[in-house]
Amino acid sequence: MAAAYAYAVDEGEAPRELVLMRYIDRFGLGVLGRTPGAGELRRMSMADRVVRAYQMRKNSGNWPAWAESDKEGARLLSIAERLYNGE
């Protein structure tokens, strides 16, 4: 999650999970040459959710209102930010 947050704030490259997810979205699961495990799929989904939550918060113009309307996204982003900051 920290790598996804770093990517969202333009301080890092796209984490492996996001790269794989983009390949799968574009070419299908066959691009991996194997079936991804549940943990790998979960990490891909989590990285995507962190980046999307960051973008939604950034575009909201009102972070407190966004946090109130998307409590799960705000919670996830808070966790990712703390991990990014080494807490």
Image: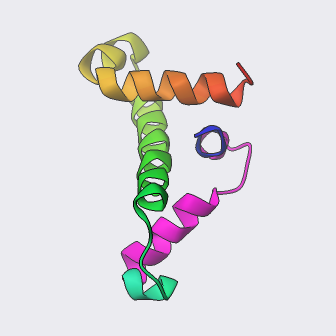
Q: Is residue 65 left or right of residue 5?
A: left
The answer to which image quadrant residue 57 occupies is top left
Vertical side of 82 occupied by 25: above or below: below
Vertical side of 36 occupied by 82: above or below: above
- Residue at 44% from the left image edge and 71% from the top image edge: 36
Whether residue 10 is in magenta: the answer is: yes
Residue 84, position as x, y percentages in the image: 68, 30
Residue 14, position as x, y percentages in the image: 64, 57
Q: How many marks?
A: 0
The answer to which image quadrant residue 87 occupies is top right
Vertical side of 29 occupied by 6: above or below: above
Q: Return the residue nearer the eye: 80 or 43.
A: 43
Q: Identify the coloring.
A: rainbow
What is the chief secondary structure element of the magenta stretch? helix
Image quadrant holding the N terminus, namely: top right
Residue 27, position as x, y percentages in the image: 40, 85
Q: Return the residue nearer the eye: 9 or 59.
A: 9
- Residue at 49% from the left image edge and 60% from the top image edge: 40
Magenta residues? 6-27
Q: Is residue 75 left or right of residue 3?
A: left
- Residue at 29% from the left image edge and 13% from the top image edge: 68
Residue 16, position as x, y percentages in the image: 62, 62
* Outermost residue, left side: 69
Whether residue 70 is in magenta: the answer is: no
- Residue at 47% from the left image edge and 69% from the top image edge: 22
